[in-house]
Amino acid sequence: MTILDGKKYSEELIQEYKERLAKYPEEIGFAIIWVGNNSASEIYVSSKLKKCKEVGITPYLYHLDEDTEEKEILKLIDKLNKDPKIKGILLQSPTPKQIDILKCFNAISEEKDVDGFAKGSLGNLVQNIPYHVSCTPRGIIKLLKHYNIDLVGKNVCIINSTIIVGKPLFHLFIGEGATVTMCHSKTKNLDFHTKNADIVVSAVGNPGFITGDMIKDGAIAIDVGISRVDGKVVGDVDKESVYEKASYVAPVPGGVGPMTIAMIFENILDTLEKER
Amino acid sequence: MTILDGKKYSEELIQEYKERLAKYPEEIGFAIIWVGNNSASEIYVSSKLKKCKEVGITPYLYHLDEDTEEKEILKLIDKLNKDPKIKGILLQSPTPKQIDILKCFNAISEEKDVDGFAKGSLGNLVQNIPYHVSCTPRGIIKLLKHYNIDLVGKNVCIINSTIIVGKPLFHLFIGEGATVTMCHSKTKNLDFHTKNADIVVSAVGNPGFITGDMIKDGAIAIDVGISRVDGKVVGDVDKESVYEKASYVAPVPGGVGPMTIAMIFENILDTLEKER
């Protein structure tokens, strides 16, 4: 079994992005809007800020109160859309319940939607002319390709149907010529689908959810689950049983997670290259 | 085996739409842009014109020369976007090869994109807040619901991956709680996927492509294939063998086809209702 080492690969990518970004003389600003004080968001936001500095991007953090009204966020997005130094805008999810997050995502201009959640970006993906693509799905495909894994005609089972992971990933795999099944909480006989898959992607958030008896020999397991057990970050994949049967595993931590952050910069680079 | 009678149901719907449209005092204009002289398009366009008159919509046909340049089409779309009497714009596919059809689809304003192929409409669908949805997929779901077929947790196999049929249909089925597999020309062991499906949707265009041994007992077969054999319109479903095993069949002709045309008016009604 080979580990799909997203940590190592993302570090190489970060170096590459740093060099590519250095060729742009202008300031490359990246706006992060974080509403409230969700503790998981705090970890994600601070790690994004750190990586920005590492690659030479100037982060602008807008940390807003828990009770911020939607119209305030829309006004801020409008201002950032018009600010030429800002090359990317990210609205950290989740947002407090008074905020219609899709409405806010959709207010981000297509050029600056580096998270790829706005409807224009999603539509580009459906039309198979992807521009800004959601970072976790983009990172998964990039990691598989780095290990020269052929995707044409492969059976892929995705357990997740969100716009953040499952749906964009579905379109990327279809674009690569894979046959894709999307499973979710209403799926019956999940095992049947996972057992038939050459590649299983699990983004459930249930520790040990994917066990060895659910996959076929030689399958590729991509773990996108994030849970915390006794203070440790764990994924959906039961390592003991899955590692015995799989050919490749993208583990948690160290697999898809680090790729996700790196893909923000790939999306920002796409904006910069289109601007030129 | 019960026939999913799209012809009969669409006639009921046309009556319903006629009554609903009669409540709007203003002229309801519908622009059809047809470039070139494709013979299949001729049939589709003339049947759309006929149905428009039947429901009380004023069709405006723009029949352009085969060698019309893309910029001319974009200029026409821009004019129609601004024309208040035009409530829907349809660009008949296929277009001649000098035209980037996706670029033209994307130029149609979201309010008037009654075919649902523009990226904004596709993005709405991915976000699970569908507004204008591609007519064939919308018609398939409407037909299944008319026969009270429960979709939650059902295994669906879609053989088609276009933005016209497969991809929007995928999102509609996912929105209904089904587990969906998308197959296409690069799929290996197609039979495996069709045999496991409660609902098989075939839009291949290969007469008799789906045979009884490819489906399980009691499956639902939705035929979206259109071919012409000896001057007759035939679908993908091999009637003799499939009718023996299926519980329901949407046949060609008389199943999904008539539903597709009816859904244009449902999309136009959505525009009118949103305008009010």
Image (cartoon, coloured by chain):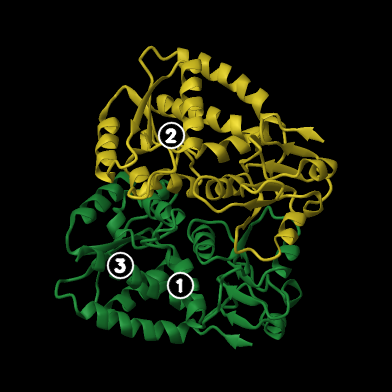
Chain colours: A yellow, B green
Which one is in front in this view, the residue at disc 1 or the one at disc 2? 2
Q: Could you tell me which chain the residue with mark 1 belongs to?
A: B
- In the picture of the structure, the residue carrying the numbered disc 1 is B139
Asked if labels 3 and 1 share a chain, the reply is yes
Task: Tell me how far mark 1 sits from mark 2, CA to CA.
Answer: 34 Å
Classed neighbour count for the residue bearing mark 3: other residues with Cα under 10 Å, few (<14), some (14–19), many (≥20): some
Task: Tell me how far mark 3 sits from mark 1, CA to CA.
Answer: 15 Å
Asked if labels 3 and 2 share a chain, the reply is no
Q: Which residue does the image show at 64% across and 51% down from the upper left?
A: A158
Q: In this view of the protein, which residue sits in the foreground, A8 or B169? A: A8
Q: In this view of the protein, which residue sits in the foreground, B166 or B128? A: B128
Asked if labels 1 and 2 share a chain, the reply is no
Find numbered disc 2 in the image and state the secondary structure of the residue it sits on: loop
Classed neighbour count for the residue bearing mark 2: other residues with Cα under 10 Å, few (<14), some (14–19), many (≥20): many
Q: Residue furthest front?
A: A230
Find numbered disc 1 in the image and state the secondary structure of the residue it sits on: helix
Is mark 1 in CB contact (under 8 Å) with mark 2?
Answer: no
Task: Tell me how far mark 3 sits from mark 2, CA to CA.
Answer: 31 Å
Q: Which mark is residue B270?
A: 3
Q: Which residue does the image show at 24% across and 50% down from the upper left?
A: B78
On screen, B71 above or below B11?
Answer: above
User: Percent from the top left, x then y, of residue A50?
Assistant: 49, 20
Q: Is residue A208 left or right of residue A85?
A: right
- In the picture of the structure, the residue carrying the numbered disc 2 is A114
Q: Which mark is residue B163?
A: none
